[in-house]
Image (cartoon, helix red, strand yellow):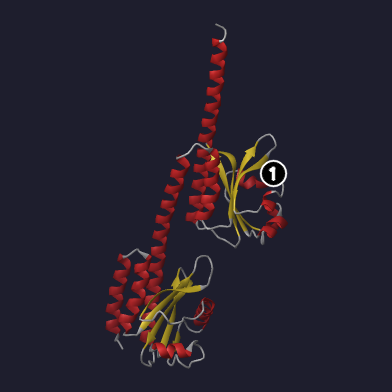
Amino acid sequence: MRNCNAYFKTFCRISNSMQSTFEMEEVLNLIVNSAVQAMDAKASSLFLKNGQGDVFFPVAQTGLSDAYVHAAPEKAQALTRDILKQGGYLAVKDATSDPRTEHHAGKQSEGIASILVVPVIAEEKPIGTLSLYTAKPRDFDKLDIEFLGALADQGGMAIQKARFIKRKKDNAALLLSITEDLNSSLDIKHILHIMSSEIAEAFNVKGASVRLMDEEKKELKLVASYGLSEAYLNKGPVSAATLSHSLSNTMVCINHHNDKSAIDYLEEKKQEGIVTMLNLPITVKEEVIGILRIYCDEDRKFSEDALTLLRSLARLGGLAIQNASMYLQLQQDKENLEKEIWSHRSWF
């Protein structure tokens, strides 16, 4: 048991440590290790949201054996909701018999007596839970609860900062990688493959397609795709008029659960399992020459960073397409010139 002054000094030291590290793994380990050391506990574990979903998974722990079985991810998520409704924490003195806990025999064999759980909050939203385990039965007092809660809050801010920095690094690396790939080739088929498959895989989406403008027919012709079935690709022509927002050089995110009037081939999209689409204009010198379409099989919300990166990649793709087209034109002009020179030579 610590007094208020000891907790305060420990919290200041932990805060300084969290401010000095930007690596996610270091932050996660620092949170659980700090909880155990500061509160003289047996063990600690940290659950966080996984990807786009709301399900919580264990991401760091200390003091627990590899054989210890945590609550199921769905249970951890439900527990967080209950905690937020019931005062912001869960204190269990006898974890081996309390009905609010699971795997009683496992906790007994692990040597766990009491558990204290608090939510991890970031930007006013729960992103996980921080659990503390003691080897001896313990009545957690107000100071214990407030300290672990403050540590979780500080940890939430540190996690968000680490995620932000990692996202910036990942985005920069992705932009560099795809830019190098686009600039390494004048083969337009290879360029279109990069714009569809590599972008889809990099952003972990269902699929992607590239359509270029056919000025004569006023249609967007499919020139590349990834992750989509032949049945869906053969659904019919896409008129340029149906994508007026995208052709005016703006990004449009459409969820067909909410805005059915704005989507063509709605039934076909349902059958394909498409939930969210993102349309990005492919431009050359501010002129829209086509559309890069991103398809998601979930209600996906792209961050501002992701949207900015995708828009940049679409523009880079436009430049690569233009360069490849100009190269093909030069090749054709060269062949025509050679033929013309040969015909002139034949006169002599």
Q: Quadrant of residue 267?
A: bottom right
| For residue 224, above or below residue 332 | below
Q: Residue at x 68, y 56 (%)?
A: 269
Q: Residue at x 44, y 51 (%)?
A: 174
| For residue 93, above or below residue 13 | below
The one of 146 and 240 positioned closer to us in this rendering: 240
Q: Residue 27, position in %: x, y?
A: 36, 69
Q: Amino acid at mark 1?
A: Ser
170 left or right of 194?
A: left
Q: Which residue is mark 1?
A: 239
The one of 40 and 156 positioned closer to us in this rendering: 40
The one of 108 and 129 positioned closer to us in this rendering: 108
Where disc 1 sits, the SS reads loop
Q: Quadrant of residue 131?
A: bottom left
Q: Quadrant of residue 25?
A: bottom left
Which residue in the rendered view is the most extreme toward the top? 348
216 left or right of 91?
A: right
Estimate how packed mark 1 is, as few (under 14), some (14 to 19) or many (20 or more) residues with alpha carbons within 10 Å.
some
Placement of the N terminus among the 4 image quadrants: bottom left
Q: Residue at x 27, y 82 (%)?
A: 6
248 left or right of 317?
A: right
Q: Residue 199, position in %: x, y?
A: 52, 51
Placement of the C terminus among the 4 image quadrants: top right
Q: Residue 311, position in %: x, y?
A: 51, 48
